[in-house]
Amino acid sequence: MQNFAPCGLRTDVGALWENFIICERVKFNHYRGSYAKIYFWRTTSQQKIDYIEEDDGVFKAFEIKWNAKKSAAKIPEIFSKTYSVKEFKVVTPENYLEIIM
């Protein structure tokens, strides 16, 4: 699809943003020699986490949001009860450099 409209006019901007952040995080880990396993998580009731890294049994979870006003996302309780979550971050255009640099 050749949609070159500005982000404010696109209906898929959230998906584009999520894809960009995940690609950059994978490159970041590669460059620093991290062998963290990568996962995505979703339940049948549609609770989800956009991006998860596991390193030595410890999980870092990331929720990726284009709209900073939606940055009040919380980690699903079932996930935090099931897995050892070291860190949970909501990634927005305002703070994304923290996880890719």
Image (cartoon, rainbow, N blue to C red):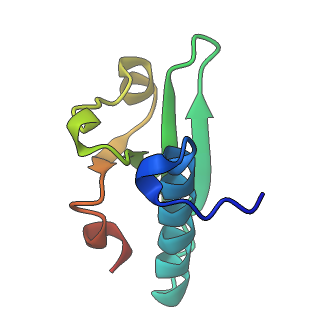
State the residue at coordinates (43%, 18%): 78
> With 50 as the anchor, is 101 left or right in this view?
left
In the image, 9 versus 61, the foreground residue is 9
Residue farthest toward the top in the current orientation of the protein: 45
Q: Indicate the quadrant containing the C terminus: top left, top right, bottom left or bottom right.
A: bottom left
Q: Indicate the quadrant containing the N terminus: top left, top right, bottom left or bottom right.
A: bottom right
**With respect to residue 5, does 13 lie above or below?**
above
In the image, 63 versus 85, the foreground residue is 63
Res. 37 image quadrant: bottom right
State the residue at coordinates (44%, 34%): 83
State the residue at coordinates (24%, 45%): 68
**With respect to residue 100, does 65 lie above or below?**
above
In the image, 81 versus 48, the foreground residue is 48
Q: How many marks?
A: 0
| Residue 57, visible in the rendered structure | no
| Residue 48, visible in the rendered structure | yes
**With respect to residue 55, does 66 lie above or below?**
above
**With respect to residue 86, does 45 lie above or below?**
above
Query: Residue 12: horizontal and vertical position, in percent?
Result: 57, 45
Query: Residue 7: horizontal and vertical position, in percent?
Result: 45, 56
Query: Residue 70: horizontal and vertical position, in percent?
Result: 27, 34
Query: Residue 98: horizontal and vertical position, in percent?
Result: 25, 69
Residue farthest toward the right in the current orientation of the protein: 1
